[in-house]
Image (cartoon, grey):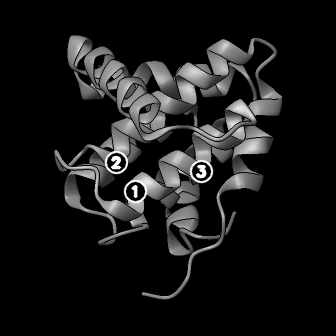
C-alpha cells in the first residue's frame, strides 16, 4: 500500500467547527471508532490514524493506555444504541456544526486506510452521510479518492 497523507489537517478543520471542544472530541472519536471497529478489529493502520487524530485534537502526545480507555468508552457508547443509530447521531451533529463533508471525508479515510472499504464500513459511511445531509452522488465522489483530505 502506498503512503497515506497525514490526517492532521482534516482533524484541525473538523475541530475548528466545534465551539465546545469536548463535544467535538467525543463526536470525532465516536466517528473514527464507528468506522475503524466496523469489522470488529481496529488494525494497526487504523490505530495509527486514531492516535494521530487524538493527538491532534488534544494537542498532546497520547499514551497507549489512554487510547485504549478512549476507544473502549467510545465502543460502549456505540454498542449502547447500535452502530446505525450512532451513525445517525454523529451525522446530524456534523451537519449541525457545518462539518458534514469533512466528517464523511474522515470516515472514508479511516475505512480505506488499511484493507480498503469493507461492506460493513460502507454501510456505516452511507448512513452517516445520509444523516449528515450528503447526497449519494457526493458521497460517491468522496469515495473515489479516500485520501484526498
Left or right of 114, for residue 6? right
Residue 75, position as x, y percentages in the image: 29, 25
Quarter occupied by residue 38: top left
What residue appears at the point 41 percent right and 66 percent down from the top-left corner?
A: 112
Q: Return the residue nearer the eye: 107 or 59.
A: 59
Estimate the spatial distance between the alpha carbons at disc 1 and disc 3, rounded to whole Å: 10 Å
Eye-nearest disc, 2 or 1: 1
Which of disc 3 and disc 1 is earlier in sequence?
1
The quarter of the picture where the C terminus appears is: bottom right
Q: Nearer the viewer, residue 94 or 6?
A: 6
Residues at circles 2 and 1 in contact by the CB criterion of under 8 Å: yes
Residue at 59% x, 50% y: name it. Answer: 52
Q: Is residue 145 above or below residue 111?
A: below
Dot 2: within a 10 Å radius of its alpha carbon, few (fewer than 14), some, or many (20 or more) residues?
Answer: many
Residue holding disc 2: 36
User: Residue 90 appears at what percent x and percent y?
Assistant: 49, 24
Secondary-structure class at tag 2 = helix
Q: Report whether 63 appears left or right of 116.
A: right
Residue 15's disc is none
- The answer to whether residue 47 is above or below residue 62 is below
Task: Tell me, for residue 46, which label it has, or none.
Answer: 1
Q: Identify the mark nearer the N-term, 2 or 3.
A: 2
Q: CA distance from mark 2 to mark 1?
A: 6 Å
Q: How far across and down, in percent of the image, does residue 25 sit?
A: 61, 24
Name of the residue lying farthest toward the left = 40
Picture quarter containing residue 115? bottom left
Placement of the N terminus among the 4 image quadrants = bottom left
In the image, taking residue 12 as reference, residue 118 lies left or right, namely: left
- The kind of secondary structure element at disc 3 is helix
Question: For residue 52, which numbered disc appears in the image?
Answer: 3
Give the residue displayed 57% in from the left and 63% down from the top.
Answer: 142
Amino acid at each position: 500500500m502506498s503512503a497515506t497523507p497525514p490526517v492532521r489537517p482534516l482533524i484541525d478543520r473538523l475541530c475548528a467547527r466545534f465551539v465546545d471542544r469536548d463535544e467535538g472530541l467525543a463526536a470525532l472519536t465516536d466517528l473514527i471508532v464507528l468506522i475503524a471497529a466496523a469489522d470488529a478489529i481496529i488494525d494497526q493502520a487504523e490505530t495509527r490514524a486514531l492516535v494521530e487524530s487524538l493527538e491532534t485534537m488534544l494537542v498532546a502526545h497520547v499514551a497507549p493506555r489512554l487510547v485504549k480507555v478512549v476507544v473502549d468508552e467510545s465502543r460502549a457508547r456505540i454498542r449502547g444504541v447500535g452502530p446505525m443509530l450512532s451513525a445517525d447521531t454523529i451525522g446530524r451533529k456534523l451537519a449541525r456544526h457545518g462539518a458534514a463533508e469533512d466528517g464523511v471525508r474522515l470516515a472514508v479515510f479511516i475505512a480505506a486506510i488499511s484493507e480498503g472499504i469493507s461492506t460493513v464500513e460502507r454501510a456505516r459511511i452511507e448512513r452517516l452521510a445520509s444523516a449528515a445531509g450528503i447526497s449519494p452522488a457526493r458521497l460517491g465522489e468522496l469515495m473515489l479518492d479516500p485520501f484526498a483530505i
